[in-house]
Image: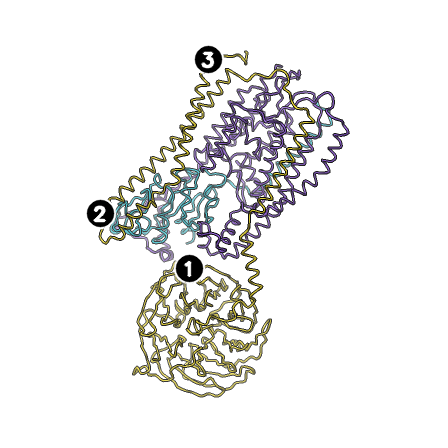
Chain colours: A cyan, B yellow, C purple
Amino acid sequence: MKPKGKRDRRDFVRGAAAVLIGGAVLSATRSRSPRWVWQIDPEKCTQCGRCATHCVLAPSAVKCFHSYSICGYCDLCGGYLRPDAKSRNTGAENQLCPTAAIKRTYIEDPYFQYTIDEDLCIGCGICVEGCDVFGNGSMYLQVKHNLCVNCNECAIARACPSDAFERVPASEPYLLKSDRERRVS
Amino acid sequence: MNEFKQRPIPGLIAQSVAGVAALFSLILCILLSADFVRIQKMDPLNDPHLLELREQLANSTDSDEAAVEQIRTFDLYARRAFFSNQEQRRTGGLLLLGGAVVCFVAFKFSKLWKPKLPAIGKSETPDHGELNALFRQLMAGTGVLLVVLSLFLAFSVQSDLATVLSRQDEGDVEVVPQASSLPPAMKANWPSLRGPGGIGVTHGSIAPTRWDVETGEGVLWETELPVHGFNSPIVWGNRIFMSGADEEGQEVFCFDADTGKPLWTQTVKTSVELPEVSEDTGFAAPTMATDGTRVFAIFATGDLAAFDFEGKPVWQKNLGLPKNPYGMGSSLISDGTRLFVQYDHEDLQKVVALDAATGRPVWETPRKHISWSSPALIETETGVQLLLNDEENVTAYDPVSGKQLWTLECLGGEVAPSPAYNGNGIVFVANEYAQASALKLTEGSPEILWQYDEYLPEISSPLATENLFFITTSAGDVVCLDAATGEVKWEQEFDDGFNSSPILVGTRIYSIDLEGVVHIFEAAAEYKPIASIEMGEPVYATPAFVNGRIYIRGDENLYCIGK
Amino acid sequence: MKRYVLHVFAYVFLFCGATFAEFRFPMPEFATGYEHPAVHTPGPSNVMVGWDIVVLLATLSLAAFLVLKRRKRREIFLLTLFSLVYFGFWRNGCVCSVGSVQNIMAGLCDPGHGVPLTVLVFFAAPLIFALFFGRVFCAAVCPLGAIQEAVAIKPGNVPLAVEKVLSIFPYIYLGLAMLSVAMGAGFIICQYDPFVGFFRMGASFSMLIFGGLMLVLGIFVARPYCRFLCPYGVLLNWCSKLSRHHATITPTDCIQCELCTDSCPYNAINEPTPEKAPEDRGKGAWRLGILILLVPFIVLLGVGVGSLLKEPLSRMHPTVRLAERIAGEELGRYAETNIESEAFRASDTPDEALYAEAIELKAGFGRGGKWLGAFIGLVMGCKLIAVSILRKRTDYEPDHGTCYSCGRCFKYCPVKE
């Protein structure tokens, strides 16, 4: 058994330590947030291609999103067809997407709908660049949250050259282009 | 229960299972690593063979069936490889995990049957003192190691940034007046509104004084302009550049200076909504500028575009939608390496210098007041200064750093006229509803020599010769003032007002009124008219004078006067 | 769903004039009455978050109960395996307590950086448990500890002196990590987490190699990460030193049988002090006095060395790296541009602004380097003093700071209740 004096001292130090931990916790929570998740700001994204290679998951949790509400439904789609494509069909020589993740379906003359097959998409952003340069920019990259493991520090965010990754509240986990326009208007 | 009971045979089995599992895991590990290294090197999308095929297909005029077929096959294999590889890796990872789990479980089990027995009797532990001595030595060794490592890091990591910054500092010290003059090529051409430096002075001394548009006498050519715009022509070598814009689009066009033939037209796509502009400003009021290799055009949308002389786009950007009751009015100017943009609007006032080659900002200095006037580059004794007018002040900036050199409150109202400079230390500014001021440049803030407030310009800029100042007003008055005293030398009234700015050519002044009459008079202390020649259509733009020719942009046509 | 579509149509109808000017291609009006599909936006899996906290608190309590009351190594180990499976493989090892130190630090430095409740609990609960029951978190809850505990098959002995010297590295790691977070240079503990790659079944190659090496080493040297790197272990060590009820080797009284002496692979069993003093008391006191006087000098040396580390430390920050890259490209040091410099040049930030920011950050790292140096100096000084103080001990007992409460020694004790 320890002498009483030593016990008291120990209790005191323990109390002080508990206060310290509590203090650290309290001051760290001055602005406590519900929960953060990672997301890409499509305005900042430069489609460098690192989303496809730097995610801890393979294939990446970043996928191409398509906001139909701002899509032009072009026959000559910059996100679907290679710039040097000779004809507008589904042939591999014409497609931009390396995994053929974009499905082209005929709606009515002269409109086509482009749908992203998320199982095939690897988040490389090649189509995004095409759509930005030649089209309305309705295709853009987003972190798919049912796939994302929500790392404490996102490995892609660390590698992103244009600082496009940011933390957003988990209650509104997407930065959709169609939403943005609605807000702006 | 005896926890140390020995059971050798199951223990042995467990041990061999563990060994096999460990071997299995190790082999898997090596395979996966090798596979990983292989994949790192693979880049099927940029495979030389595929690129070659694509090239071949792109170059063939009709669809090259064989190439198409080959690309498709290649693509199929690449995809199949990609996906089966992913599957393999996932399976490999799971197998590895399984192997490791089996290995460790088996090992734990084998230990269950052959546990580590407690050592009986105290093993020879070193004596406390010896242990401490060893600890202190090791700690000292670690300390030294850490220090050495830190020193190595500190001296091996060099900062390029520090080098660049110190170089910049040295540069600042060495060349205080960084550019004492504009490039000579600029003076031989007409690179911006009101010529080299934008002060309305031609460096050549001859220009025609007789021509007739109706008969075509003395007119080398005339050509129709495709899109309307209030901006003035700029000329470099044998090329003329102008811009035009309306609700339909924004265009930049280039003409051959010898024949008047259009060489190219480029559209500048806008990414923003069209702003409201007044009718007498339009969407293309600012005059273009050139640095000798590229031409630059800015529009009421804030779209700024650079093209090379062949019309190839070099860069384009939007400086932000200008909010402005009339529209963007300020013209561009370049000193050969930088492009300066005066961007004074309702909610944003700034002057920016962009790298002419890339369009990247070199510096940006905030300003305080709105303005429609254009910047001028003047060559003073201490170096080139960038002069800007706004609705209160005249301000000079260092074109290299963007640092404000001086500012003086002597303007007022909605200012459109730009500054004038007599080439000898006196700056001349004037605006309607304020006054005309002559500013003598000194080391610090300039000194106001005199002020004058009778006939003042609203749109056209004043003009300075060495000893005389000239003002042309919207009411049609022309006033000549003494540069040193401000004494009125003469006043002359014409029928129509002036939007176009007067230009000094040798000893003569050319000034075009709104009805398109070119008034030519001597730049002298007495009024000596030389000629008044009708162009036959309204003229708002300031003419360009190069190599004894005059280029005049009328409302609809572009004229070349001369031989 | 239907409402969403209505929304979109209302918006299209209302604002088509204003917004269509922004698009190259107007949105078509479909004659066939086509309605576009909605964008599929699955939310993050929220369900588990509350469970994580519950499971954490439950496992901590159970671990404390097993260590202090049940005293069965096998049961503790089973709980360890459960934690490995749940916190590791099932929950992908994120957020873990080890990494949460950084979130707390980030929250302290930048009030705008919100710290979620889960992270707070993950940070505080193990420390509070350590204050009362010792490092039961390390024993059976931490997935990083668990995976190392699982592979520790043939743990050898590390000489005590080496162990003590190596134990300063967690402090250095902690100092570096805190500096990095304070300067906004990223979470290096997460970046160099050796095992999270296994938990997620995927990581960068270097991360997997590092983790693999750590595991192979862990077969022969038990818990190498916990002992010689883990920054959270530093805090747990401090708290555990004060613990009210720490695990003991013997359930009642020590009979000095010495059976447990080499049962601990972590060098965490303190032996009783020998009867006769190992050396002259006066000599020991002298040495202690000199060491205490030496501490300020070691700290000063640390400050001096730390101030030299401004440049290398500042390279942790991406902005500084970018500024150096841009400056290097300007000096013609690199043959080509890289993705970062291209992205920067595509933006409208002037070089000067980047340089100014980098200079400011470097100044911050200069200050931080001095603090880091002082901290490391202080730690080394304190270690020297602590080792030189001879505490009176009569029994074999676990070292309250370094004992992981793994329970290996329990069965070696012949004394039963």
The amino acid on which the numbered mark 1 sits, given as a three-letter code, is Lys
Residue B9: which disc? 3
Relative to B90, does residue C25 appear above or below in the rendering?
A: below
The answer for which chain carries disc 2 is B
Q: Position of residue C351 (x, y in %)?
A: 50, 56
Label 1 neighbour load within 10 Å: few <14, some 14-19, many 20+: some
| Residue, disc 2 | B65
N-terminal of the two: label 3 or label 2?
3
Are marks 3 and 2 in one subunit?
yes
Can residue C162 be seen by looking at this rendering? yes
N-terminal of the two: label 3 or label 1?
3
| Residue, disc 1 | B317
The amino acid on which the numbered mark 3 sits, given as a three-letter code, is Ile
Relative to C158, does residue A120 appear above or below in the rendering?
A: below
Can residue B230 be seen by looking at this rendering? no
Q: Is B195 situated left or right of C117 in this image?
A: left
The Cα atoms of the two marked residues, 2 and 1, are separated by 41 Å
Kindly indicate whether the residue at mark 1 contacts the one at mark 2 (C-beta within 8 angstroms): no
Residue B29: which disc? none
Viewport quadrant of the C terminus of chain C:
top right
Q: Position of residue B377 (x, y in %)?
A: 49, 71
